[in-house]
Image (cartoon, coloured by chain):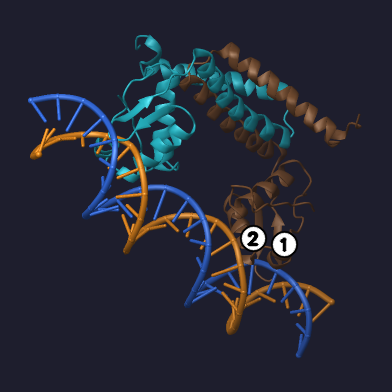
Chain colours: A brown, B cyan, C blue, D orange
DNA sequence: CCTCTGTGTATACATTATATACACAGTATA
DNA sequence: TATACTGTGTATATAATGTATACACAGAGG
């Protein structure tokens, strides 16, 4: 399983772990009831303290993404496809809300923002194409 | 001049001051060469330490929004309308980029995101209307 | 019994934000 | 020249947060 964190990322490391595992769950790369790496194992893999990983797992459990069993491990929770889609939409909605508020505060028009949005989408598409993600061949 | 900061805002107080003054400048509510409140005055007004305000002013100066003169005060820099517009677009662009990246990472389609965007824009319009901003009368 | 697992607790360091305080230098005005 | 403002430099301190190491305990499974 591919989890990456970076000390140079301004986000706290435990939050990076949370984000990454959430993403793997909602995009189906982690299945229901699949066991997660143990706290100690992942802390060794990511070269970070077990307390950091433990904190991430506690957060994920609190938010309902995983469940843990003392002495056994931590597992992906059973979440319906609908719940997963709802969560995804909510995340993007919140991110868009921040962008829209910023645009409003700075007196930009809807047209201007839509154009910026189109630019960012295209740029993201290009970056993803060139990195081989998304199932399309490289140029 | 209306500057508000809040200790309950997760953003550091000095950043809130920076953001607020930047917004007043780029939306024309602060004019070129207009004097800003002094560090001591604003710290009294906002009930915060002068060091906090000073840090905000130093940040604003570093980014070219204001200039300061020891013994005299701090003033709004002379920025062309084009520069101000560029900065505004850049801010919103960055915010949109975060939203688009999030959408990509979560495998949402452009159509889904556009629809969410429309919802957020409409919601922001409604909130602004009901709060009397934007020059329109309250219902 | 051993080897894993999660859990509780203790202690410590680093970074960042914010605070109070004082003194100094610059500017403008009377 | 004195006063009242301004910004600037420096010192000291507290609080919050994130991260780290370490140890011990309890649960689960083979």
| In the rendered image, the vertical position of residue A135 relative to residue A56, given as above or below | above
Q: CA distance from mark 1 to mark 2?
A: 7 Å
**For residue A129, which quarter of the picture?**
top right
The one of B88 and B122 positioned closer to us in this rendering: B88
Marks 1/2 same chain: yes
Residue at the top extreme of this rendering: B136
Which residue appears at 35% of the width and 26% of the height?
B75
Mark 1 residue element: helix
* Chain ID of residue with mark 2: A
Which residue is disc 2 drawn over?
A53
First in residue order: circle 1 vs circle 2: 1
**For residue B132, which quarter of the picture?**
top left
Q: Are marks 1 and 2 in contact (CB under 8 Å)?
A: yes
Which residue appears at 71% of the width and 42% of the height?
A26
Is B83 situated left or right of B114 in this image?
left
Mark 2 residue element: helix
Which residue is disc 1 drawn over?
A42
- Picture coordinates of residue B50, whole percent (x, y): 30, 43
* Chain ID of residue with mark 1: A
Question: Dot 2, how many residues are within 10 Å of its Cα: few (below 14), some (14-19), or many (20+)?
Answer: many
Quarter of the image for the N terminus of chain B: give it: top left
- Picture coordinates of residue B137, whole percent (x, y): 35, 9
Is B46 situated left or right of A133 in this image?
left
Quarter of the image for the C terminus of chain B: give it: top left
Which residue appears at 66% of the width and 52% of the height?
A17
* Residue B133 appears in the figure: yes
**For residue B39, which quarter of the picture?**
top left
| In the rendered image, the vertical position of residue A11 relative to residue B137, given as above or below | below
């Amino acid at each position: 399983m591919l989890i990456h964190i970076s000390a140079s990322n301004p986000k706290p490391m435990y939050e990076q772990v949370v984000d990454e595992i959430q993403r793997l769950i909602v995009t189906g790369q982690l299945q229901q009831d699949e066991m997660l790496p143990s706290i100690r194992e992942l802390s060794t893999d990511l070269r970070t303290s077990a307390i950091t990983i433990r904190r991430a797992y506690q957060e994920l459990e609190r938010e309902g993404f995983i469940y843990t069993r003392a002495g056994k491990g931590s597992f992906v929770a059973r979440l319906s496809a609908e719940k997963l889609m709802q969560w995804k939409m909510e995340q993007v909605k919140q991110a868009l809300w921040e962008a829209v508020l910023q645009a409003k505060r700075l007196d930009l028009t809807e047209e201007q923002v839509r154009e910026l949005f189109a630019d960012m989408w295209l740029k993201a598409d290009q970056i993803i194409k060139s990195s081989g993600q998304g199932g399309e061949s490289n140029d």
